[in-house]
Image (tube, rainbow, N blue to C red):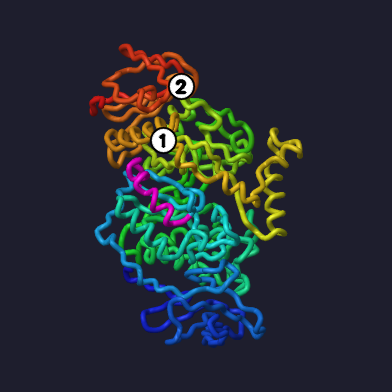
Protein backbone atom coordinates (compact mmCIF):
# COMPACT_ATOMS: atom_id res chain seq x y z
CA UNK A 1 0.00 0.00 0.00
CA UNK A 2 2.76 2.44 -0.95
CA UNK A 3 4.53 4.37 1.82
CA UNK A 4 1.34 5.48 3.54
CA UNK A 5 -0.34 3.95 6.57
CA UNK A 6 -3.76 4.93 7.93
CA UNK A 7 -4.05 6.46 11.38
CA UNK A 8 -7.79 6.95 12.03
CA UNK A 9 -10.38 4.44 13.16
CA UNK A 10 -9.81 0.91 14.45
CA UNK A 11 -6.69 -0.52 12.81
CA UNK A 12 -5.78 -4.20 13.21
CA UNK A 13 -2.12 -4.93 12.39
CA UNK A 14 -2.26 -8.71 12.73
CA UNK A 15 -1.46 -8.65 16.45
CA UNK A 16 -3.38 -5.82 18.10
CA UNK A 17 -5.90 -3.10 17.33
CA UNK A 18 -5.11 0.61 17.58
CA UNK A 19 -7.99 3.04 18.02
CA UNK A 20 -7.65 6.71 17.12
CA UNK A 21 -10.29 9.43 16.95
CA UNK A 22 -10.23 13.24 16.89
CA UNK A 23 -12.40 14.73 19.64
CA UNK A 24 -10.69 17.98 20.74
CA UNK A 25 -13.60 19.38 22.75
CA UNK A 26 -14.00 16.36 25.04
CA UNK A 27 -12.29 15.52 28.34
CA UNK A 28 -12.52 11.75 27.96
CA UNK A 29 -13.09 9.17 25.24
CA UNK A 30 -13.62 5.44 25.76
CA UNK A 31 -13.99 2.46 23.46
CA UNK A 32 -17.04 0.41 24.45
CA UNK A 33 -16.88 -3.19 23.21
CA UNK A 34 -20.22 -4.72 22.26
CA UNK A 35 -19.22 -8.24 23.26
CA UNK A 36 -19.12 -7.48 26.99
CA UNK A 37 -19.98 -3.75 27.20
CA UNK A 38 -16.53 -3.16 28.68
CA UNK A 39 -15.00 0.31 28.61
CA UNK A 40 -11.46 0.88 27.34
CA UNK A 41 -10.17 4.41 27.99
CA UNK A 42 -8.23 6.19 25.27
CA UNK A 43 -5.34 8.54 25.99
CA UNK A 44 -5.69 12.14 24.89
CA UNK A 45 -3.01 14.24 23.23
CA UNK A 46 -2.58 18.00 22.95
CA UNK A 47 -3.75 18.01 19.32
CA UNK A 48 -7.16 16.61 20.27
CA UNK A 49 -6.56 13.01 19.19
CA UNK A 50 -7.40 10.10 21.49
CA UNK A 51 -5.77 6.71 20.99
CA UNK A 52 -4.78 3.41 22.58
CA UNK A 53 -3.79 -0.17 21.61
CA UNK A 54 -5.48 -3.37 22.77
CA UNK A 55 -4.13 -6.87 22.15
CA UNK A 56 -7.47 -8.60 22.80
CA UNK A 57 -9.52 -6.61 20.25
CA UNK A 58 -9.61 -8.41 16.93
CA UNK A 59 -11.35 -8.34 13.54
CA UNK A 60 -15.08 -8.99 13.94
CA UNK A 61 -15.27 -7.21 17.29
CA UNK A 62 -17.88 -4.48 17.37
CA UNK A 63 -17.47 -1.26 19.30
CA UNK A 64 -18.62 2.28 19.87
CA UNK A 65 -17.00 5.41 21.27
CA UNK A 66 -18.18 7.12 24.43
CA UNK A 67 -17.36 10.82 24.51
CA UNK A 68 -17.89 12.49 27.87
CA UNK A 69 -19.16 10.97 31.08
CA UNK A 70 -22.71 9.93 30.18
CA UNK A 71 -22.63 6.09 29.96
CA UNK A 72 -25.67 6.04 27.66
CA UNK A 73 -24.11 8.25 25.00
CA UNK A 74 -22.09 6.02 22.68
CA UNK A 75 -21.50 6.57 18.99
CA UNK A 76 -20.13 4.86 15.89
CA UNK A 77 -16.55 5.53 14.86
CA UNK A 78 -16.30 8.49 12.42
CA UNK A 79 -13.68 6.45 10.51
CA UNK A 80 -15.47 3.10 10.85
CA UNK A 81 -14.48 0.54 8.21
CA UNK A 82 -17.85 -1.24 8.43
CA UNK A 83 -21.30 -0.66 9.93
CA UNK A 84 -22.92 -4.12 9.78
CA UNK A 85 -26.13 -2.99 11.51
CA UNK A 86 -26.38 0.40 9.83
CA UNK A 87 -25.00 3.86 10.44
CA UNK A 88 -26.57 4.14 13.90
CA UNK A 89 -25.20 0.78 15.05
CA UNK A 90 -21.81 -0.34 16.31
CA UNK A 91 -18.68 -0.20 14.18
CA UNK A 92 -16.75 -3.36 13.37
CA UNK A 93 -13.01 -3.98 13.40
CA UNK A 94 -11.94 -5.13 9.92
CA UNK A 95 -8.85 -7.01 8.78
CA UNK A 96 -7.77 -4.78 5.92
CA UNK A 97 -5.12 -7.26 4.74
CA UNK A 98 -7.16 -10.48 4.62
CA UNK A 99 -8.32 -10.16 1.01
CA UNK A 100 -6.12 -11.95 -1.53
CA UNK A 101 -5.69 -9.62 -4.47
CA UNK A 102 -4.93 -10.97 -7.95
CA UNK A 103 -4.33 -7.63 -9.72
CA UNK A 104 -0.58 -7.26 -9.19
CA UNK A 105 -0.01 -6.92 -12.95
CA UNK A 106 -2.97 -4.61 -13.53
CA UNK A 107 -2.25 -1.52 -15.60
CA UNK A 108 -5.05 1.08 -15.83
CA UNK A 109 -5.99 2.54 -19.22
CA UNK A 110 -4.22 5.61 -20.48
CA UNK A 111 -6.31 8.71 -19.74
CA UNK A 112 -6.82 9.17 -23.49
CA UNK A 113 -8.55 5.76 -23.61
CA UNK A 114 -11.03 6.34 -20.79
CA UNK A 115 -14.71 5.69 -21.44
CA UNK A 116 -16.73 5.92 -18.23
CA UNK A 117 -19.77 3.86 -17.29
CA UNK A 118 -21.56 5.34 -14.26
CA UNK A 119 -23.68 2.99 -12.19
CA UNK A 120 -25.63 2.84 -8.95
CA UNK A 121 -24.87 -0.41 -7.15
CA UNK A 122 -28.34 -0.78 -5.65
CA UNK A 123 -30.27 -0.49 -8.92
CA UNK A 124 -27.75 -1.81 -11.45
CA UNK A 125 -28.79 -5.43 -10.91
CA UNK A 126 -31.62 -7.39 -9.34
CA UNK A 127 -29.33 -8.26 -6.42
CA UNK A 128 -28.37 -4.63 -5.83
CA UNK A 129 -24.99 -5.63 -4.40
CA UNK A 130 -21.28 -5.57 -5.19
CA UNK A 131 -21.56 -9.24 -6.15
CA UNK A 132 -24.39 -8.33 -8.49
CA UNK A 133 -22.14 -5.83 -10.27
CA UNK A 134 -19.47 -8.53 -10.65
CA UNK A 135 -22.02 -10.69 -12.44
CA UNK A 136 -22.41 -8.01 -15.14
CA UNK A 137 -18.76 -7.06 -15.66
CA UNK A 138 -18.47 -9.25 -18.76
CA UNK A 139 -21.25 -7.20 -20.35
CA UNK A 140 -19.34 -4.00 -19.66
CA UNK A 141 -16.06 -5.40 -20.94
CA UNK A 142 -17.69 -6.54 -24.19
CA UNK A 143 -19.46 -3.19 -24.55
CA UNK A 144 -16.13 -1.41 -24.85
CA UNK A 145 -16.11 0.93 -21.86
CA UNK A 146 -12.82 1.07 -19.98
CA UNK A 147 -13.84 2.32 -16.52
CA UNK A 148 -16.79 1.86 -14.22
CA UNK A 149 -17.69 4.77 -11.97
CA UNK A 150 -19.56 3.76 -8.84
CA UNK A 151 -21.95 6.30 -7.38
CA UNK A 152 -21.08 6.86 -3.69
CA UNK A 153 -20.96 3.63 -1.69
CA UNK A 154 -20.17 5.01 1.78
CA UNK A 155 -22.85 3.87 4.22
CA UNK A 156 -26.04 5.87 4.61
CA UNK A 157 -29.19 5.82 6.72
CA UNK A 158 -31.82 3.31 5.65
CA UNK A 159 -31.73 0.58 3.03
CA UNK A 160 -31.63 2.68 -0.15
CA UNK A 161 -30.13 5.99 -1.18
CA UNK A 162 -28.36 7.59 -4.13
CA UNK A 163 -25.32 7.68 -1.84
CA UNK A 164 -24.91 11.43 -1.54
CA UNK A 165 -26.36 11.29 1.99
CA UNK A 166 -23.21 9.50 3.09
CA UNK A 167 -22.89 9.20 6.87
CA UNK A 168 -20.00 6.73 7.28
CA UNK A 169 -17.34 7.89 4.85
CA UNK A 170 -14.94 4.95 5.27
CA UNK A 171 -17.49 2.13 5.42
CA UNK A 172 -18.85 0.47 2.27
CA UNK A 173 -22.61 0.30 2.68
CA UNK A 174 -23.81 -2.91 4.30
CA UNK A 175 -26.76 -2.68 1.86
CA UNK A 176 -24.29 -3.60 -0.92
CA UNK A 177 -22.08 -6.10 0.89
CA UNK A 178 -18.96 -6.35 3.01
CA UNK A 179 -15.65 -4.50 2.58
CA UNK A 180 -14.17 -7.62 1.00
CA UNK A 181 -17.12 -7.78 -1.41
CA UNK A 182 -16.10 -4.33 -2.65
CA UNK A 183 -12.49 -5.47 -2.92
CA UNK A 184 -13.66 -8.49 -4.91
CA UNK A 185 -15.52 -6.16 -7.29
CA UNK A 186 -12.42 -4.04 -7.92
CA UNK A 187 -10.27 -7.15 -8.35
CA UNK A 188 -12.75 -8.72 -10.77
CA UNK A 189 -13.00 -5.49 -12.78
CA UNK A 190 -9.23 -5.31 -13.12
CA UNK A 191 -9.19 -8.91 -14.34
CA UNK A 192 -11.44 -7.73 -17.20
CA UNK A 193 -9.30 -4.66 -17.97
CA UNK A 194 -11.83 -2.32 -16.41
CA UNK A 195 -10.66 0.53 -14.19
CA UNK A 196 -12.76 1.41 -11.14
CA UNK A 197 -13.56 4.98 -10.12
CA UNK A 198 -15.40 5.89 -6.95
CA UNK A 199 -17.63 8.91 -6.44
CA UNK A 200 -16.73 10.55 -3.11
CA UNK A 201 -18.58 13.33 -1.30
CA UNK A 202 -16.51 15.80 0.71
CA UNK A 203 -18.67 18.92 0.36
CA UNK A 204 -21.38 17.83 2.80
CA UNK A 205 -22.46 14.87 4.93
CA UNK A 206 -25.77 13.05 5.24
CA UNK A 207 -28.59 14.52 7.35
CA UNK A 208 -29.04 11.31 9.35
CA UNK A 209 -26.42 9.05 10.90
CA UNK A 210 -23.50 11.47 10.66
CA UNK A 211 -22.00 11.85 14.13
CA UNK A 212 -19.03 14.05 13.28
CA UNK A 213 -20.49 17.07 15.08
CA UNK A 214 -20.75 14.96 18.24
CA UNK A 215 -16.99 14.46 18.22
CA UNK A 216 -16.16 18.04 17.24
CA UNK A 217 -18.10 21.11 16.13
CA UNK A 218 -14.97 22.09 14.17
CA UNK A 219 -15.86 19.75 11.34
CA UNK A 220 -18.08 22.59 10.04
CA UNK A 221 -17.53 26.27 9.35
CA UNK A 222 -20.69 28.39 9.67
CA UNK A 223 -18.90 31.33 8.00
CA UNK A 224 -19.54 29.55 4.69
CA UNK A 225 -23.01 28.34 3.78
CA UNK A 226 -23.89 25.75 1.15
CA UNK A 227 -27.22 24.27 -0.01
CA UNK A 228 -26.73 21.70 2.76
CA UNK A 229 -26.04 24.21 5.56
CA UNK A 230 -22.70 25.16 7.12
CA UNK A 231 -19.83 24.09 4.90
CA UNK A 232 -17.32 21.42 5.75
CA UNK A 233 -14.51 23.23 7.55
CA UNK A 234 -11.53 23.59 5.25
CA UNK A 235 -10.19 26.98 6.33
CA UNK A 236 -10.92 27.87 9.96
CA UNK A 237 -9.94 26.56 13.41
CA UNK A 238 -9.52 22.80 13.20
CA UNK A 239 -9.44 22.75 9.40
CA UNK A 240 -6.05 21.02 9.30
CA UNK A 241 -7.54 17.97 11.04
CA UNK A 242 -10.72 18.00 8.94
CA UNK A 243 -8.58 18.06 5.80
CA UNK A 244 -6.51 15.21 7.22
CA UNK A 245 -9.72 13.22 7.79
CA UNK A 246 -10.87 13.71 4.18
CA UNK A 247 -7.47 13.05 2.62
CA UNK A 248 -7.11 9.91 4.69
CA UNK A 249 -10.48 8.85 3.33
CA UNK A 250 -9.31 9.36 -0.24
CA UNK A 251 -6.12 7.37 0.37
CA UNK A 252 -8.19 4.70 2.11
CA UNK A 253 -10.14 4.00 -1.09
CA UNK A 254 -7.08 4.22 -3.31
CA UNK A 255 -4.80 2.01 -1.23
CA UNK A 256 -7.08 -0.31 0.74
CA UNK A 257 -9.45 -0.91 -2.19
CA UNK A 258 -7.16 -0.41 -5.22
CA UNK A 259 -9.51 2.05 -6.92
CA UNK A 260 -8.00 3.78 -9.94
CA UNK A 261 -9.58 7.18 -9.53
CA UNK A 262 -12.00 9.35 -7.61
CA UNK A 263 -14.84 11.52 -8.87
CA UNK A 264 -15.01 14.44 -6.42
CA UNK A 265 -18.63 15.52 -5.96
CA UNK A 266 -19.64 19.19 -6.30
CA UNK A 267 -16.17 20.69 -5.88
CA UNK A 268 -17.69 24.14 -6.37
CA UNK A 269 -19.17 23.65 -2.87
CA UNK A 270 -15.77 23.06 -1.23
CA UNK A 271 -15.51 26.49 0.40
CA UNK A 272 -11.83 27.13 1.03
CA UNK A 273 -9.92 30.39 1.38
CA UNK A 274 -6.68 28.69 2.45
CA UNK A 275 -3.40 29.49 0.78
CA UNK A 276 -3.34 25.94 -0.56
CA UNK A 277 -6.78 24.90 -1.75
CA UNK A 278 -8.02 21.54 -0.51
CA UNK A 279 -8.17 20.21 -4.08
CA UNK A 280 -4.48 20.95 -4.60
CA UNK A 281 -3.67 19.32 -1.27
CA UNK A 282 -5.57 16.12 -2.05
CA UNK A 283 -3.84 15.96 -5.43
CA UNK A 284 -0.44 16.30 -3.76
CA UNK A 285 -1.23 13.74 -1.06
CA UNK A 286 -2.30 11.11 -3.58
CA UNK A 287 0.73 11.77 -5.77
CA UNK A 288 3.01 11.46 -2.74
CA UNK A 289 1.54 8.28 -1.28
CA UNK A 290 -0.34 6.24 -3.87
CA UNK A 291 2.73 4.85 -5.59
CA UNK A 292 0.90 4.80 -8.93
CA UNK A 293 -1.10 7.18 -11.12
CA UNK A 294 -4.56 7.91 -9.71
CA UNK A 295 -7.08 9.89 -11.76
CA UNK A 296 -8.99 12.70 -10.04
CA UNK A 297 -12.13 14.06 -11.71
CA UNK A 298 -14.06 17.08 -10.44
CA UNK A 299 -17.78 17.60 -10.73
CA UNK A 300 -17.81 21.37 -11.08
CA UNK A 301 -20.17 23.66 -12.98
CA UNK A 302 -17.87 26.71 -13.04
CA UNK A 303 -15.87 25.78 -16.17
CA UNK A 304 -12.60 26.72 -14.46
CA UNK A 305 -9.37 26.01 -16.27
CA UNK A 306 -7.54 26.12 -12.95
CA UNK A 307 -9.11 22.85 -11.88
CA UNK A 308 -7.15 20.85 -14.44
CA UNK A 309 -4.03 22.93 -14.93
CA UNK A 310 -0.90 21.39 -13.34
CA UNK A 311 0.24 22.73 -9.98
CA UNK A 312 3.35 24.29 -11.52
CA UNK A 313 0.99 26.48 -13.58
CA UNK A 314 -0.99 27.54 -10.49
CA UNK A 315 -3.64 24.90 -11.08
CA UNK A 316 -5.08 22.28 -8.76
CA UNK A 317 -3.68 19.44 -10.87
CA UNK A 318 -6.89 17.45 -11.30
CA UNK A 319 -7.06 15.19 -14.34
CA UNK A 320 -10.51 16.01 -15.68
CA UNK A 321 -13.80 17.77 -14.99
CA UNK A 322 -17.42 16.92 -15.74
CA UNK A 323 -18.38 19.35 -18.51
CA UNK A 324 -22.17 19.37 -18.66
CA UNK A 325 -22.48 22.09 -21.31
CA UNK A 326 -22.42 19.43 -24.05
CA UNK A 327 -25.34 17.61 -22.43
CA UNK A 328 -27.33 20.81 -22.03
CA UNK A 329 -26.80 22.00 -25.61
CA UNK A 330 -27.75 18.63 -27.12
CA UNK A 331 -30.77 18.27 -24.86
CA UNK A 332 -32.09 21.73 -25.74
CA UNK A 333 -31.70 20.94 -29.45
CA UNK A 334 -33.16 17.45 -29.34
CA UNK A 335 -35.77 17.61 -26.55
CA UNK A 336 -36.43 21.39 -26.56
CA UNK A 337 -35.90 21.87 -22.82
CA UNK A 338 -36.08 25.57 -22.01
CA UNK A 339 -36.61 25.98 -18.24
CA UNK A 340 -34.25 26.01 -15.27
CA UNK A 341 -30.59 26.13 -16.24
CA UNK A 342 -31.52 25.24 -19.82
CA UNK A 343 -32.37 28.93 -20.36
CA UNK A 344 -28.60 29.44 -20.64
CA UNK A 345 -28.35 27.31 -23.79
CA UNK A 346 -29.53 27.88 -27.35
CA UNK A 347 -29.16 24.30 -28.55
CA UNK A 348 -28.17 25.53 -32.01
CA UNK A 349 -25.81 23.37 -34.01
CA UNK A 350 -23.39 26.32 -34.04
CA UNK A 351 -23.28 26.28 -30.24
CA UNK A 352 -23.08 22.49 -30.07
CA UNK A 353 -20.08 22.59 -32.40
CA UNK A 354 -18.52 25.40 -30.36
CA UNK A 355 -18.96 23.37 -27.18
CA UNK A 356 -17.19 20.41 -28.78
CA UNK A 357 -14.35 22.63 -30.01
CA UNK A 358 -13.82 24.20 -26.58
CA UNK A 359 -14.74 21.35 -24.24
CA UNK A 360 -17.24 23.59 -22.48
CA UNK A 361 -19.42 26.42 -23.76
CA UNK A 362 -19.21 29.19 -21.16
CA UNK A 363 -15.79 30.87 -21.10
CA UNK A 364 -16.64 34.06 -19.20
CA UNK A 365 -19.97 34.89 -20.82
CA UNK A 366 -22.93 36.12 -18.78
CA UNK A 367 -25.29 33.28 -17.92
CA UNK A 368 -28.92 34.27 -18.31
CA UNK A 369 -30.05 32.20 -15.32
CA UNK A 370 -27.78 34.04 -12.87
CA UNK A 371 -26.86 37.30 -14.60
CA UNK A 372 -23.26 36.55 -13.67
CA UNK A 373 -20.23 35.66 -15.80
CA UNK A 374 -19.41 31.97 -15.90
CA UNK A 375 -16.33 30.08 -16.99
CA UNK A 376 -12.82 30.73 -18.20
CA UNK A 377 -11.23 30.13 -21.61
CA UNK A 378 -10.05 26.50 -21.75
CA UNK A 379 -6.49 27.41 -22.74
CA UNK A 380 -4.23 24.43 -22.12
CA UNK A 381 -7.14 22.07 -21.47
CA UNK A 382 -6.91 18.88 -23.53
CA UNK A 383 -10.21 17.54 -24.93
CA UNK A 384 -9.91 14.34 -22.88
CA UNK A 385 -9.92 16.44 -19.69
CA UNK A 386 -13.59 17.25 -20.27
CA UNK A 387 -16.00 14.43 -19.41
CA UNK A 388 -19.21 14.72 -21.45
CA UNK A 389 -22.46 12.76 -21.49
CA UNK A 390 -26.01 12.43 -22.75
CA UNK A 391 -27.11 10.94 -19.44
CA UNK A 392 -25.77 10.81 -15.90
CA UNK A 393 -27.35 10.31 -12.51
CA UNK A 394 -28.01 14.05 -12.08
CA UNK A 395 -29.32 14.80 -15.55
CA UNK A 396 -31.72 11.84 -15.37
CA UNK A 397 -32.46 11.53 -11.67
CA UNK A 398 -33.04 15.21 -11.07
CA UNK A 399 -35.89 15.23 -13.58
CA UNK A 400 -39.24 14.85 -11.88
CA UNK A 401 -40.02 11.56 -13.59
CA UNK A 402 -36.44 10.26 -13.90
CA UNK A 403 -36.77 10.28 -17.68
CA UNK A 404 -33.76 9.49 -19.83
CA UNK A 405 -33.08 11.37 -23.07
CA UNK A 406 -34.24 8.43 -25.20
CA UNK A 407 -37.57 8.48 -23.34
CA UNK A 408 -38.22 11.96 -24.72
CA UNK A 409 -36.80 11.82 -28.25
CA UNK A 410 -37.18 9.24 -30.99
CA UNK A 411 -34.56 6.53 -31.29
CA UNK A 412 -33.23 7.89 -34.59
CA UNK A 413 -32.36 11.15 -32.83
CA UNK A 414 -30.86 9.27 -29.92
CA UNK A 415 -28.67 7.22 -32.26
CA UNK A 416 -27.39 10.42 -33.89
CA UNK A 417 -26.69 12.06 -30.52
CA UNK A 418 -24.96 8.88 -29.28
CA UNK A 419 -22.68 8.95 -32.32
CA UNK A 420 -21.74 12.54 -31.56
CA UNK A 421 -21.05 11.66 -27.91
CA UNK A 422 -18.90 8.61 -28.56
CA UNK A 423 -16.91 10.04 -31.46
CA UNK A 424 -16.29 13.49 -29.96
CA UNK A 425 -12.71 14.05 -28.77
CA UNK A 426 -13.80 14.54 -25.15
CA UNK A 427 -14.00 11.67 -22.64
CA UNK A 428 -17.49 10.13 -22.86
CA UNK A 429 -19.53 8.92 -19.91
CA UNK A 430 -22.45 6.51 -20.19
CA UNK A 431 -25.10 6.03 -17.52
CA UNK A 432 -26.18 2.50 -16.73
CA UNK A 433 -28.67 1.10 -19.23
CA UNK A 434 -28.10 3.88 -21.74
CA UNK A 435 -26.36 1.45 -24.08
CA UNK A 436 -29.56 -0.48 -24.73
CA UNK A 437 -32.00 2.45 -24.34
CA UNK A 438 -33.37 1.06 -21.09
CA UNK A 439 -37.06 1.65 -20.48
CA UNK A 440 -36.51 2.08 -16.75
CA UNK A 441 -36.25 5.60 -15.31
CA UNK A 442 -33.73 6.62 -12.67
CA UNK A 443 -35.67 8.36 -9.94
CA UNK A 444 -34.60 10.10 -6.76
CA UNK A 445 -35.01 7.74 -3.78
CA UNK A 446 -34.29 7.75 -0.04
CA UNK A 447 -35.12 5.72 3.05
CA UNK A 448 -35.00 8.17 5.95
CA UNK A 449 -37.00 7.98 9.17
CA UNK A 450 -40.59 9.26 8.79
CA UNK A 451 -40.05 12.78 10.12
CA UNK A 452 -37.05 13.49 7.89
CA UNK A 453 -38.55 11.50 5.03
CA UNK A 454 -41.64 13.71 4.95
CA UNK A 455 -39.40 16.78 4.63
CA UNK A 456 -37.43 15.12 1.83
CA UNK A 457 -40.63 14.34 -0.08
CA UNK A 458 -41.97 17.87 0.38
CA UNK A 459 -38.64 19.40 -0.61
CA UNK A 460 -38.32 17.22 -3.67
CA UNK A 461 -41.70 18.26 -4.99
CA UNK A 462 -41.29 21.94 -4.14
CA UNK A 463 -38.09 22.03 -6.25
CA UNK A 464 -40.27 21.79 -9.35
CA UNK A 465 -42.76 24.52 -8.45
CA UNK A 466 -41.08 26.97 -10.83
CA UNK A 467 -41.51 24.64 -13.81
CA UNK A 468 -44.60 25.18 -15.91
CA UNK A 469 -45.52 21.50 -15.93
CA UNK A 470 -45.69 21.50 -12.12
CA UNK A 471 -47.10 24.94 -11.37
CA UNK A 472 -50.30 23.19 -10.26
CA UNK A 473 -49.87 21.60 -6.80
CA UNK A 474 -51.94 18.63 -7.98
CA UNK A 475 -49.33 17.92 -10.65
CA UNK A 476 -46.48 18.24 -8.14
CA UNK A 477 -48.22 15.71 -5.92
CA UNK A 478 -47.82 13.16 -8.75
CA UNK A 479 -44.01 13.38 -8.64
CA UNK A 480 -42.83 9.99 -7.33
CA UNK A 481 -42.28 9.97 -3.58
CA UNK A 482 -38.55 9.41 -2.84
CA UNK A 483 -39.51 7.51 0.32
CA UNK A 484 -41.78 5.02 -1.44
CA UNK A 485 -39.92 1.70 -1.94
CA UNK A 486 -41.58 1.46 -5.36
CA UNK A 487 -39.65 4.54 -6.49
CA UNK A 488 -36.42 2.65 -5.86
CA UNK A 489 -37.71 -0.54 -7.49
CA UNK A 490 -38.84 1.30 -10.63
CA UNK A 491 -35.27 2.53 -11.05
CA UNK A 492 -33.77 -0.97 -11.20
CA UNK A 493 -32.51 -2.00 -14.63
CA UNK A 494 -34.41 -4.70 -16.50
CA UNK A 495 -31.57 -6.69 -18.04
CA UNK A 496 -33.83 -8.96 -20.10
CA UNK A 497 -34.57 -5.98 -22.38
CA UNK A 498 -31.16 -6.35 -24.03
CA UNK A 499 -32.31 -9.47 -25.87
CA UNK A 500 -35.21 -7.83 -27.70
CA UNK A 501 -35.70 -5.10 -30.32
CA UNK A 502 -35.12 -2.20 -30.30
CA UNK A 503 -32.78 -2.62 -27.33
CA UNK A 504 -30.73 -5.37 -28.96
CA UNK A 505 -29.88 -3.15 -31.93
CA UNK A 506 -29.14 -0.13 -29.73
CA UNK A 507 -26.65 -2.21 -27.76
CA UNK A 508 -24.97 -3.18 -31.02
CA UNK A 509 -24.83 0.49 -32.02
CA UNK A 510 -22.96 1.35 -28.82
CA UNK A 511 -20.56 -1.55 -29.28
CA UNK A 512 -19.78 -0.52 -32.84
CA UNK A 513 -19.33 3.13 -31.95
CA UNK A 514 -16.90 2.27 -29.17
CA UNK A 515 -14.97 0.06 -31.58
CA UNK A 516 -14.80 2.97 -34.02
CA UNK A 517 -13.64 5.29 -31.25
CA UNK A 518 -10.70 3.01 -30.50
CA UNK A 519 -9.88 2.59 -34.19
CA UNK A 520 -10.30 6.15 -35.48
CA UNK A 521 -9.62 8.73 -32.78
CA UNK A 522 -5.97 9.74 -32.59
CA UNK A 523 -4.26 9.07 -29.27
CA UNK A 524 -3.59 12.06 -27.01
CA UNK A 525 -5.59 14.41 -29.22
CA UNK A 526 -5.05 18.11 -28.51
CA UNK A 527 -7.42 21.00 -29.15
CA UNK A 528 -5.88 21.69 -32.54
CA UNK A 529 -6.09 18.13 -33.78
CA UNK A 530 -9.73 18.19 -34.89
CA UNK A 531 -12.43 20.49 -36.23
CA UNK A 532 -16.09 20.75 -35.26
CA UNK A 533 -18.59 22.83 -37.20
CA UNK A 534 -22.28 23.19 -37.98
CA UNK A 535 -23.19 22.17 -41.52
CA UNK A 536 -26.70 23.59 -41.19
CA UNK A 537 -29.34 24.15 -38.50
CA UNK A 538 -29.69 20.41 -37.95
CA UNK A 539 -26.24 18.92 -38.53
CA UNK A 540 -22.89 18.90 -36.74
CA UNK A 541 -19.66 17.55 -38.22
CA UNK A 542 -16.44 16.54 -36.46
CA UNK A 543 -13.33 15.96 -38.51
CA UNK A 544 -10.15 14.17 -37.50
CA UNK A 545 -7.24 13.34 -39.79
CA UNK A 546 -8.72 10.83 -42.22
CA UNK A 547 -12.13 10.65 -40.52
CA UNK A 548 -15.38 12.60 -40.77
CA UNK A 549 -18.36 12.27 -38.42
CA UNK A 550 -21.62 13.84 -39.62
CA UNK A 551 -24.49 13.83 -37.11
CA UNK A 552 -27.91 15.12 -38.10
CA UNK A 553 -29.65 15.75 -34.79
CA UNK A 554 -33.10 16.75 -36.06
CA UNK A 555 -35.29 16.34 -39.15
CA UNK A 556 -34.43 14.75 -42.46
CA UNK A 557 -32.66 16.56 -45.27
CA UNK A 558 -29.53 16.88 -47.40
CA UNK A 559 -26.09 18.15 -46.48
CA UNK A 560 -22.94 18.55 -48.55
CA UNK A 561 -19.52 17.48 -47.33
CA UNK A 562 -16.08 18.29 -48.67
CA UNK A 563 -14.51 14.84 -48.89
CA UNK A 564 -16.77 11.83 -48.34
CA UNK A 565 -14.13 9.09 -48.00
CA UNK A 566 -15.15 5.48 -47.40
CA UNK A 567 -18.37 5.03 -45.44
CA UNK A 568 -17.61 2.86 -42.40
CA UNK A 569 -20.77 3.35 -40.34
CA UNK A 570 -24.28 4.77 -40.46
CA UNK A 571 -26.99 4.75 -37.84
CA UNK A 572 -29.25 3.09 -40.39
CA UNK A 573 -27.05 0.01 -40.77
CA UNK A 574 -29.40 -2.96 -40.30
CA UNK A 575 -27.52 -4.34 -37.30
CA UNK A 576 -27.90 -1.12 -35.27
CA UNK A 577 -31.58 -0.28 -35.86
CA UNK A 578 -34.72 -2.37 -35.91
CA UNK A 579 -36.40 -0.30 -38.67
CA UNK A 580 -33.59 0.78 -40.98
CA UNK A 581 -34.26 3.55 -43.50
CA UNK A 582 -31.02 3.81 -45.50
CA UNK A 583 -29.07 7.05 -45.64
CA UNK A 584 -28.23 7.92 -49.25
CA UNK A 585 -24.69 9.09 -49.98
CA UNK A 586 -24.08 10.32 -53.53
CA UNK A 587 -20.78 12.01 -54.21
CA UNK A 588 -20.55 14.89 -51.74
CA UNK A 589 -24.23 14.84 -50.75
CA UNK A 590 -25.68 12.95 -47.79
CA UNK A 591 -29.46 12.58 -47.75
CA UNK A 592 -30.85 11.78 -44.31
CA UNK A 593 -34.42 10.39 -44.30
CA UNK A 594 -34.57 11.25 -40.60
CA UNK A 595 -32.06 12.15 -37.87
CA UNK A 596 -28.98 9.98 -38.11
CA UNK A 597 -25.21 9.89 -38.46
CA UNK A 598 -22.58 8.84 -40.95
CA UNK A 599 -18.90 8.10 -40.36
CA UNK A 600 -16.48 8.13 -43.26
CA UNK A 601 -12.80 7.34 -43.13
CA UNK A 602 -9.75 6.85 -45.29
CA UNK A 603 -8.17 4.94 -42.40
CA UNK A 604 -10.60 2.07 -41.97
CA UNK A 605 -12.42 -0.15 -44.43
CA UNK A 606 -16.11 -0.78 -43.89
CA UNK A 607 -16.58 -4.06 -42.01
425 to 596, vertically: above or below: below
In this view, the residue in front, 235 or 21, is: 21
Give the overall secondary structure of the magenta segment.
Answer: helix
Q: Which percent across, then down, holds residue 359?
A: 43, 38
Task: Provide the residue span drawn in magenta.
Answer: 129-146
Residue that appears at 57% across and 65% down = 233
Q: Is residue 50 above or below residue 245?
A: below
Q: Is residue 552 left or right of residue 398?
A: left
Tell me: 310 left or right of 483.
left
Q: Quadrant of the C terminus?
A: top left
Q: Nearer the viewer, mark 1 or mark 2?
A: 1
Which residue occupies 74% across, 36% down?
471
Label drawn at residue 595: 2
Q: Kindly report the distance in space between the C-alpha atoms of the residues bearing marks 1 and 2.
A: 25 Å
Q: Find residue 521 and report its image quarter.
A: top left
* Earlier sequence position, callout 1 versus callout 2: 1
Amino acid sequence: MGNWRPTLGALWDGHETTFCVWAPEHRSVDVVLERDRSDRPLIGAADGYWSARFEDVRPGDRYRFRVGSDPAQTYPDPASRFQPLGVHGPSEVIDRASFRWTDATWTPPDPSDLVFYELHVGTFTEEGTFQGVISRLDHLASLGVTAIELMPIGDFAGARNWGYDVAALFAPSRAYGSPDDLRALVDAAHARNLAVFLDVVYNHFGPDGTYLRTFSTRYFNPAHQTPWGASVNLDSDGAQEVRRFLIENALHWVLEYHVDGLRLDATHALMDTSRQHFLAEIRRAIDDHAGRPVHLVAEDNRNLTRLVLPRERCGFGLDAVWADDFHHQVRVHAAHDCEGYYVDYSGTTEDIAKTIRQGWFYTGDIARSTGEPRGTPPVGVAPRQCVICLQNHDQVGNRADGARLHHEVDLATFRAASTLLLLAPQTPLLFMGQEWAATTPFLFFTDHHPELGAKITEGRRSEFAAFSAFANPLERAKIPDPQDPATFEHSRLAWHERDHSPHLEMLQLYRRLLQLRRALLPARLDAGGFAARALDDHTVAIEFPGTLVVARLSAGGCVRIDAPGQVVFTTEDPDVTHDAVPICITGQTITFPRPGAVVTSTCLARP
